[in-house]
Image (cartoon, rainbow, N blue to C red):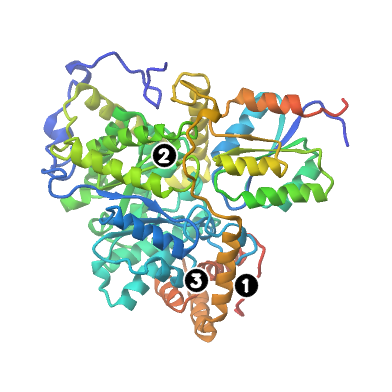
Amino acid sequence: MGKRKGIKVLVSVIGLDGHSTGAEIVSRMLMDAGMEVVYLGIYQTPEMIVQAAIQEDVDVIGISSHASNYGQIVDLLGLLKKNHLNDIHVICGGTIPNQQAQELKKKGVSEIFLPQSTSTSIVNYIESNVKRPDV
Amino acid sequence: MKRETDYGHPIKTFYHPKDIEGLDYNRDLGDPGSYPYTRGYYPDGYRKRVWTQRMTAGLGSSKQTNEVLRRYREMGQRGGMLVICDRTNAMPIDPDHPIGRREAGVLGWPGASLYEFEQLMDDIPLTGQSITLLGSCAMSSIRLAYIVALAEKRGIHLKDVHGSVTEYPFCTTFGQTDAQPLDLDLKLWLDSSEYIVRNKIRMRSGILSQHFQESGGNNAQALAVEMAMLKELCGLLVHERGLDFDDVALLPYELVSVGSRFFEDIAKIRALRRMWAKMARETFKAKKEKSCQLLISVHTSGRTMTYQQPLNNIARCAIQTLAGAIAGCTAIDNACLDNAHAEPSPLAARMSLNTQHIVADETGVTDVADPLAGSYFVEYLTNKVEEEAYKIWNKIEEIGGMIAAVEKGFVQKMLKESAQEKHREVESGERLVVGVNELVIPPEEDFQIPIQELKTGDSEEIARRMEEWKKTRNMPLINQKIAQLYVDAKKEDTYNLMPSIIEAVKAYATAGEIIGVIRKARGLSYDPLQAIDCPFDL
């Protein structure tokens, strides 16, 4: 993999969910914090997201969820494992009920950011948990 | 704390007559029931008819949604029903589509065929209450066909049905997304609208600022975008489809998002009535008074409902409902205490409906029309939001109207910037939100509300049921109706597809099939997600 300076994050909405405002706002805040962001937009399947993650060699995948389609987040985790991409952190944000949030974390989502999470909390989490590759 | 309107205009400590100097009562306000209708359409306000009190339903299968509708009726929802479609139906693709089967029944009702609509409406009257089906624009003509078909089956005169089942073509830009290009959405919307107007059906079409505002737009922008949409869409029906404006004016209804800026939200609705009345009379040369009265419903803002300390949302909902009632509206549907968590639980739905009844029956708000008229502050805000909205609307007109402004990305950019700004205001503490950036408690101390959610297998079950049902259909009949639709869809855009869509719906062709065939006729892929091929030999 090529050398790079900063953390690279893929931000996407998954499945048929059309609520893109959250993903757009988070993309902006990560860019403002100096991270490189690949924003995929809406109507992305787990397969499309994994393919983009490989192509773009990202450190983190951020999924914005406002449509209770959590099954596809679980599919995404499975696909990452299958492709030996266990080092990519998957974080989620959005209106995810508490019980679902706990389930998703058990299944391998690194962290869940609930509505109104601050930029600082999201940026700090990524910066302290992602090991940067050699520069 | 910021002392500004949500569109950035500074607010003074108090207001006096000089702030509304030049306000002419008859010219700018008028009595309730008089042009320019700033004060509402009825001299007796709510005394003859209180707003329709309703709740959104839609989650899981048609049977589950039908049960919710019946429960709402028991809770006192008799004036109108409101159902929102699921994500597959918004696109539309069928629940048995490989991607659809992962999300059927998510966020709404999977209304992919007349069969589903019949189940949804089982033992629920089609008349005597307003029938509102919400979703995306692409489904508009198909939902209208459901109404036509079910009325016929039940032996009901179409003219006795009222409500709204069609929706404007710009919603896809504002978060209520479908998978169709703007030109196709526009064509389908014009077809369904023309059909409604020509046949004098008492069905409204939603041309809504709610999606825009819930996506982060401010009050002045929401007014501007609403007026720009109304002007362009009504203009197309008059000029392209040759309809009379006085007939067209009975078509649109606006759903206003009422958030937590109490006085500003009231001012916005008062200004909207005045702006529409002026446009109807001056631009479209309306001949009838009724044409100058835009039907306005209120949706209390889901965006303002917090995830944290959800019980606080009951208070927010009550304040917003009161604002909507004071402003004057035809119907209110509330956001719920669990809005940031899931679809309304029975508890949340009951609280929400009860909130409307408390506001209507216990506060005295239904006694007097437009009770805040004459308040220096409210009249000032009404003038101000109108003035700011005209500035933005003029910019949209300079670009060439709403379609051009969307195609050029102007409206999307304005919305994105406004959403970013709203987020920044809360994050910096310039705007306070209790439980979020003020009076915060640890999550483990938070009250756990009941959550209504889909189980993982539910979507798959809806999909399997559809697969089985599809095999039982009369395929020769469907093939014949689909072939006719395909031929018609190849004709010029002004050729109205409603009759052939109605025929296909009656034969139980599905939403995915109908839109797929129309897409194919227009040179697009049958499946908007390009995962399946066209099953018809065309």
Q: Quadrant of residue B527?
A: bottom right
Identified at 37% across, 69% down, the residue is B122
Residue A74 in the image: above or below residue B365: below
Task: Determine whether label 1 and label 3 are within 8 Å by CB.
Answer: no
Does B136 sit left or right of B219 as displayed?
right
Instruction: Decide: few, some or many residues near mark 1? Use Cα within 10 Å; few <14, some 14-19, many ≥20.
Output: few
Q: Are marks 3 and 2 in contact (CB under 8 Å)?
A: no
Query: Judging from the image, what secondary structure is the residue with disc 3 in?
Result: helix
Residue under the image location 67 percent in, 26 percent down: A123
Placement of the C terminus of chain B among the 4 image quadrants: bottom right
Q: Position of residue A79 (x, y in %)?
A: 77, 51
Residue A10: % across, % down = 71, 38
Q: Which mark is residue B489?
A: 3
Most foreground residue, B234 or B303 = B303
Q: Answer whether residue B183 is visible to the viewer in this image.
A: yes
Please state which amino acid type lies under the numbered disc 2.
Answer: Leu
Identify the residue position indicated by label 1 in the image.
Answer: B534
